Amino acid sequence: MDLLLARGYDVVSIDLNPPHTECTAVGIVCDLADREALDRNMAAIFAGGPYAVVILNAGISATGRFEKMPVEAYRKLMKVNAEAPMVLASALANAGALKGHLCFVSSLSHFTGYPGAAVYAASKDALAVYAKSIRKPFAKRGIAVTVAYPGPLRTEHAARHAPPGADAARRRDPALAARTMLDAVLAGKRVAFSDPRARTVAVAGGLLPGVMARAMRRVIFEKLDRDVW
Amino acid sequence: MKSRMLITGATSGIGAALAARYAGRADLLLAGRRPYEEVAATLPADAHYVVADQSEPERAAAQIGKALADLGWETLDVVVLNAGTGWSGDPATEPAASIRNTLDANLFAAVTLAHALAALLEGGQLVLVGSTARRGAPRFASYAAAKAGLDGLARALSEEWRGKVRVKIVHPGPTATGMHAKAGFHTGRARALFAPPEMMARLIERAIARRRIRRTISFPQYLAAAVTPWRR
Ligand SMILES: NC(=O)c1ccc[n+]([C@@H]2O[C@H](COP(=O)([O-])OP(=O)(O)OC[C@H]3O[C@@H](n4cnc5c(N)ncnc54)[C@H](OP(=O)(O)O)[C@@H]3O)[C@@H](O)[C@H]2O)c1
């Protein structure tokens, strides 16, 4: 968001919280896990448009053993990560409130598998393939669709869900990753990776899915010492 | 003892064909969204039936859980999560309610069922029915998304449950069932190339017996199956 503001865009944010006070973005406060709230806010969201760029980035996680986590956590995760962005994209396109670029933020797990976060992985797969599916029909409406696959970033989200001992220094600076991905979105690219390493993971996952899934199990699932959602 | 099997979406199409194949060889609990009276004629005579509408996933999981408890089944050898439904059209015009229902009935219901049945499945096998649409389908966008989600769920869970529950996903290609019409899609002349549901059920049974985690069943397999009718 800071990057878009710095580049001179007028920004509308949809978030649980309003933007911080010095920020000039218009805030629409909406819990994306709440269907009625999203439907209620839709008119205000359209009114902020027509948009030249829409980035559907909101996402939450749930890491731990699949059967140990409460199903309510999965319900919320599916709504925030997959359902809400799909509903928003479709509604914005249909209302003509978006002409330009649409970006969905998926996950590198789309190329590997993610034991210890099966439902997170499912939600991000759903999002990536929704984006692939709508790319052509949306192009006819003047909307270029990009899927972003960020690699590990130094965010609070990652710190909360990473296994103990994971090396935060090896994660990318989110501001740098945002710039790389935004440039790909504005260029109308089909996919946007945060950095070359993320692209390598994607290629390796495509070539050797079994090997990559097992590697993910070793580096993540077997080290998880707690269930977090 | 016969193996115990749960099949969802067993009231038409591929699920009904699967139920017919396993009838007599396995103890069957079949699930569907319609009342028993409406579907009784299509179910194998000795199969049990439970109403579980996956448009409300949490409720469906509770209903299936209760049916299993009533039967006194404490283990399940094979669970086939086959129920599925879609919406077809220009994705920009898909109503929010349809996007939500497509994700719920196809994907989130599978999550809630896998979650609810985890303990009963130990030593057994969980089979998800995906679709070749999982790679993307412009006129079935939310359905393709839900099926891709199932693939991701299967990839993660098969690894997570290794040594405990075998998790597989089968991705059928086009099959001559009522699904497309229910989704508002006219299959036209291409339908001549679709697999009959009985053939698809036969190929799914074969995939269940094999070790591969992910199996796509499309035209090459139909052709092979069509020229080997003796391999039933
Ligand atoms: N046909 C194809 O070309 C094709 C291709 C790839 C994958 N598949 C997948 O194969 C599976 C079986 O599909 P099919 O072709 O056999 O279609 P079908 O004939 O329409 O059968 C679908 C089954 O799921 C049930 N169902 C639908 N919505 C439900 C809900 N909300 N709650 C509970 N049950 C529900 C249906 O009940 P009713 O009998 O009441 O309708 C029926 O028993 C689905 O997962 C489908 O996505 C089909």
Image (cartoon, grey):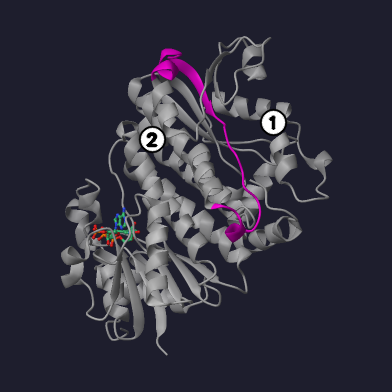
- Amino acid under label 2? Lys
- Point out the tag, 2 or 1, that comes first from the N-terminus: 2
In the image, which disc is placed on residue A136?
2
Residue A197, image quadrant:
top right
Report the quarter where the C terminus of chain B lies: bottom left
Instruction: Give yes or no for residue A53 being in the magenta stretch.
Output: yes
User: Whole-percent x and y of residue A200?
Assistant: 68, 47
Relative to B121, A192 lies left or right = right
Q: Which type of secondary structure does the marked residue at label 2 adopt? A: helix
Question: Range of the magenta residues?
Answer: A43-70
Q: Which type of secondary structure does the marked residue at label 1 adopt? A: helix
- Amino acid under label 1? Ala
B164 vs A195, nearest the viewer: B164
Residue A61, image quadrant:
top right
Residue at the image position 46 percent from the left and 51 percent from the top: B148
Residue at the front extreme, as displayed: B70
User: Whole-percent x and y of residue B90?
Assistant: 30, 35
Instruction: Give how far apart the Cα atoms at labels 2 and 1 are.
Output: 26 Å
In the image, which disc is placed on residue A177?
1
Residue at the image position 48 percent from the left and 46 percent from the top: A126
Name above or below for residue B193 compared with residue B101. below
Residue B197, image quadrant:
bottom left
Residue at the image position 42 percent from the left and 59 percent from the top: B61
Relative to B94, A1 lies left or right = right
Q: Quadrant of ligand 1?
A: bottom left
Relative to B206, B41 lies left or right = left
B208 vs B95, nearest the viewer: B95
Q: Residues within 10 Å of mark 2 (few under 14, many from 20)?
A: some
Badges 2 and 1: C-beta atoms under 8 Å apart?
Answer: no
